[in-house]
Amino acid sequence: MIEAHILDSWTLRSARGSYAFGYLNLVGGFAAPLFLWLAGLGLVLSAERALQRTGDRATAASGAVRRGFEILLLAFLFRLQAFIVSPGNPPVSLLRVDILNIMGPAVMGAAIVWRVARGTRSAGCRASWPPRAGRSRRAALWKGGEGLLALLPYP
């Protein structure tokens, strides 16, 4: 992620058309999705640990939702800090979307979905896959709107 920001900020305009800049820009583009994936992994690990500690799924989920709200709040505070430090920016720049503006609501949404789920595996995978005797594979895949979940490999 540091490479992407440095490349974007400190590269001369004349060098932006080079192949090296293009390849480095491509490599820097992997940082944001990897950052989001690791944040999701961290959310799962912390929520499961909170569930083990408290024994209450609602309490663990509310902590994860609170953490997502904190990330979103920090995103706006960083944007406000950049607005104050760099005078001359239009006020609409406060509403610019960055990685933290995506990660905060994503963490909150994932925590809410995790709160609603009842087990470690989705009910859709358990109910639809593998197909039971007497059911066709297609019927098992699309039973009750669980088709996308049933396409996942059975653990």
Image: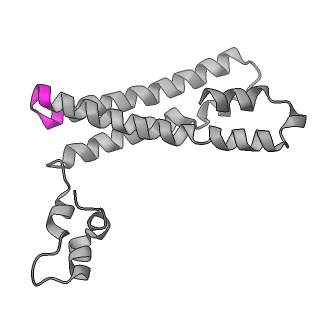
66 in magenta: no
Which residue corresponds to the image point at 86% horizontal and 30% vertical from the top-left?
A: 12
103 vs 141: above or below = above
Between 34 and 144, which is closer to the camera in this rendering?
Answer: 34
Residue 67 in picture, x, y percent from top left = 34, 28
Residue 41 percent location from the top left of the image: 35, 37
Vertical placement of 112 versus 89: above or below? below
Quadrant hosting residue 39: top left
In the figure, is residue 35 to the left or right of 48? right
1 left or right of 45 in image = right
Q: Position of residue 97 (x, y in %)?
A: 58, 38
User: In the image, is residue 53 part of the stretch drawn in magenta?
Assistant: yes
Picture quarter containing residue 2? top right
125 and 92: which is toward the camera: 125
Q: Which residues are magenta?
A: 52-58
Does 83 sit left or right of 149 as displayed? right
Tag count: 0
Which residue shows up at 19% across the image and 49% down it? 117
Q: Position of residue 46 (x, y in %)?
A: 27, 30
Residue plotted at (67% across, 44% down): 26
What is the image's colouring? one colour
Quarter of the view holding residue 30? top right
Query: Residue at position x 32%, y 34% from top?
Result: 43
Magenta-colored segment: predominant secondary structure: helix
Residue that sits furthest to the top in the current view: 85
| Extreme-right residue of the structure | 14
* Residue toward you, 25 or 123: 25
